[in-house]
Image: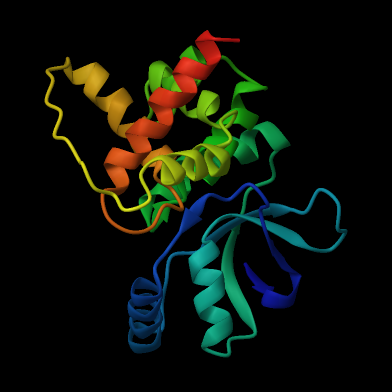
Amino acid sequence: MRIPLAKLRPHPANANVMTEERLEKLAENIRREGDYPPLVVRPHPEEEGCYQILDGHQRDEVLRRLGHSDALCYLWPCDDRTALMLLATLNRLEGQDDPLKRAALLKELTDLASPEELAQLLPESATLIHQSVKLLDLDLDALLADLQKESPTGTGLRAITFAVTPEDEAVIEEAVRLASAGLEGKNRRGRALAIIAKACLERRGE
C-alpha cells in the first residue's frame, strides 16, 4: 500500500542511524532505480489516521529529500511489545545503531521480557543486554569531566594488555562502544574504559 509521507511518524525508540554519506548513496540508488524495499509500519497508537514506522526510517528521510509525496509501505498491525522487537531486529539490517539509543531500546525490552528471552531473538547475548542496560545508569558526562581534570593534556599514557575469553571480549567491546559514545579526540577507547572502571569503583564504594 502507498501512504502519504505526511501521515508517517518515526518510532521514538528507533536507535538506527545512517551517516550523511550513506544517506546520499541511498538517495542516489532510489533516484536511479525508482524502487526500494517497502517501509514497515503499523497504525499509529495515538494519532488516528497516521502510521508509525517500524523499519525504514532512512528511506522515509530520503524520500522526503527527493520530493516524494508518498511511500510504498507494508502494514504490520502489532502491539507495543512487538513493535519494539521489530525495531530491535529489522532496523539492524541497514545503517548502524546509536549506542545509547540502542541501550535505551534494550532497557524498554527488558521491561517486557528477560534478557535471556530477548537473547533468543536479538543479536546480543543475555550478558551484553545486561551490560548495555547497566551503562544507562552511568553519569558519563560527570565521569568524563573528572578524567579530563585529572589528565587535561592526555600525557603519561600507558598501554595495558590482558587476555580474555571470547565471550568476555564481546562484553568489553560492547561496554567500551557504549561508554565512548559522544567522546571526541584521541584515545576514545582508552578513556571509555577508564570511565567504566571508575564507575565500577564508585559503585563498590556506595
Residue 26 rendering spot, x and y as whole percentages: 37, 75
Residue 198 sits above or below residue 184 on the image: above
- Identify the residue shown where x is 46% and y is 53%: 182
Residue 24 appears anywhere in the view? yes
Q: Nearer the viewer, residue 188 or 33?
A: 188
Q: Where residue 101 appears, x then y in whole percent?
A: 55, 45
Q: Position of residue 175 (x, y in %)?
A: 38, 31
Task: Give the left or right position of residue 12, taking residue 21 as reference.
Answer: right
Tell me what residue is drawn at x 62 percent, y 67 percent.
Answer: 1
What is the quadrant of residue 196 in the picture?
Answer: top left
Looking at the image, residue 41 sits to the left or right of residue 123; the answer is right
Above or below, comparing residue 157 to residue 68 in the picture = above
For the point 59% across and 74% down, which residue is it?
A: 71
Most foreground residue, 45 or 107 = 107
Taking 75 as reference, is 96 left or right? left
Instruction: In the rendered view, tell whether residue 57 sits above or below residue 83.
Output: below
The spot of residue 84 in percent (x, y) is 61, 38
Q: Quadrant of residue 133?
A: top right
Q: Is residue 123 visible?
A: no
Q: In the image, is 87 to the left or to the right of 9?
A: left
Residue situated in front as seen by the camera: 111 or 72:
111
- Residue at 47% of width from left, 29% of height from top? 132
Q: Nearer the viewer, residue 191 or 113?
A: 191
Instruction: Please give the count of numbered marks on the rendered protein.
Output: 0
